[in-house]
Image (cartoon, helix red, strand yellow):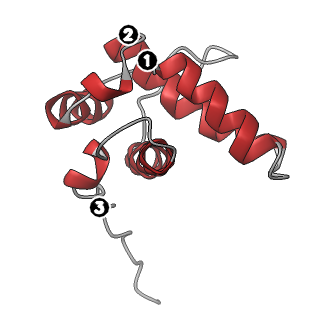
Amino acid sequence: MVLSRATEGLLLLEKVVGGRSTKTVEGYRCAPDRLEIFVGDTDTEDLGTAQVRWFLARLRSGYRPQRFGGDASLVSEKAVRNFHIVLSSFWSWLVAAGVAKGNAFRELPVPRLPLPGIEPFK
């Protein structure tokens, strides 16, 4: 199944019908859509760990997505982590539905966030 059809299937069956909020559904649409921009409307069976690693590396290395309102800031580390988590969930759904054989995102560690600096009390 190609990414675009798989995305619509997940959103319709698991998120909209499941009573998820509109914001949650938008978040679940964004990550597969960004992946599709990078790899094309590829068959989910053809997507491997190397492509997933490349996608996540690209997000971390100066990628500036097109945003409404003209914001040209880089993708944050938290956003990269969220992409990994959402896409891993998406692929778990594909595996459970029998559409994919394995979850390439589970083969890579979830990106860690830097610890926030703590200001000493003065």
Please identify the residue farthest to the top as the structure is shown.
Answer: 40
Q: What secondary structure is found at the residue carrying circle 1?
A: helix
Q: Mark 2 or 3, which is nearer the eye?
A: 2
Question: Pointer 3: what residue?
Answer: 112
Q: What secondary structure is found at the residue carrying circle 3?
A: loop
- Is there CB contact under 8 Å for labels 1 and 2? yes
User: Where's residue 74, x and y in %?
Assistant: 41, 29
The amino acid type of the residue labelled 3 equals: Arg
User: Where's residue 13, x and y in %?
Assistant: 73, 40
User: Where's residue 98, x and y in %?
Assistant: 44, 42
Closer to the N terminus: mark 2 or mark 3? 2
Closest to the observer: 43 or 112?
43
Closest to the observer: 2 or 29?
2
Closer to the N terminus: mark 1 or mark 3? 1
Q: What secondary structure is found at the residue carrying circle 2?
A: loop
Question: Pointer 1: what residue?
Answer: 36
User: Where's residue 58, x and y in %?
Assistant: 26, 26
